[in-house]
Image: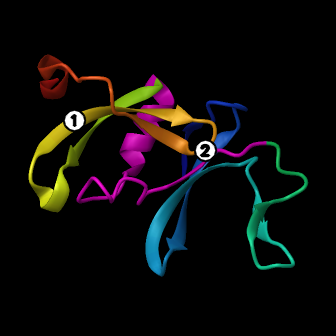
Amino acid sequence: MILGKCPYCKGNVHAIKSSANGKKVNLYSCENAKKEYDDSEQFVFTADSTCTFRVYSNVFLRWNKRSFSKYEMKKLLEDEQIIVRLHGRAGTKEYFKYVITDKEYGVSILWDEEVEEKLISS
């Protein structure tokens, strides 16, 4: 399933079923970000890989009770930033933060940016 265009190379970003730490997750990956296992069993980008944009759907589970959805990734690729709902320790406080694409990590939370209340309800 194609979710949109890569923010860095304009290749197609696909949603791929994958696994991380033994759990089934979605991998949102640019078609030009190819990985394989090398001789030391490390997962590395291939020699013909021209992009590094990859995001696992469980990227926010540390602060969220659910995975980063295909819809959210599609919206992020279209709008360049989205608002996500996060939770404090043990699910205590709920708060909202902006998420943007990040060259090194795939996506980043803008911790210092406050989300205006009117943007949350729209």
Q: Residues within 10 Å of mark 2 (few under 14, many from 20)?
A: many
Image point (43%, 57%), residue name: 57
Across and down, in percent, residue 50 comes to: 82, 43
Quadrant location of the C terminus? top left
Q: Which residue is mark 1?
A: 96
Outermost residue, left side: 92
Image point (24%, 23%), residue name: 114
Q: Quadrant of residue 84?
A: top left
The mark tally for this picture is 2
Q: Does the segment drawn in magenta span residue 40?
A: no
Across and down, in percent, residue 30 comes to: 66, 46
Please give the label number shown on residue 66.
Answer: none
Q: Does the segment drawn in magenta span residue 69?
A: yes
Region of the chain picked out in magenta, as a range: 51-79
Across and down, in percent, residue 27 comes to: 54, 59
Q: Quadrant of residue 99?
A: top left
Q: The residue tagged with tag 1: helix, strand or loop?
A: strand
Q: The residue tagged with tag 2: helix, strand or loop?
A: strand
Q: Earlier in the sequence, mark 1 or mark 2?
A: 2
Q: Is residue 120 above or below residue 69?
A: above
Q: Is residue 57 left or right of residue 121?
A: right
Q: Which residue is mark 2?
A: 13
Q: Nearer the viewer, mark 1 or mark 2?
A: 1
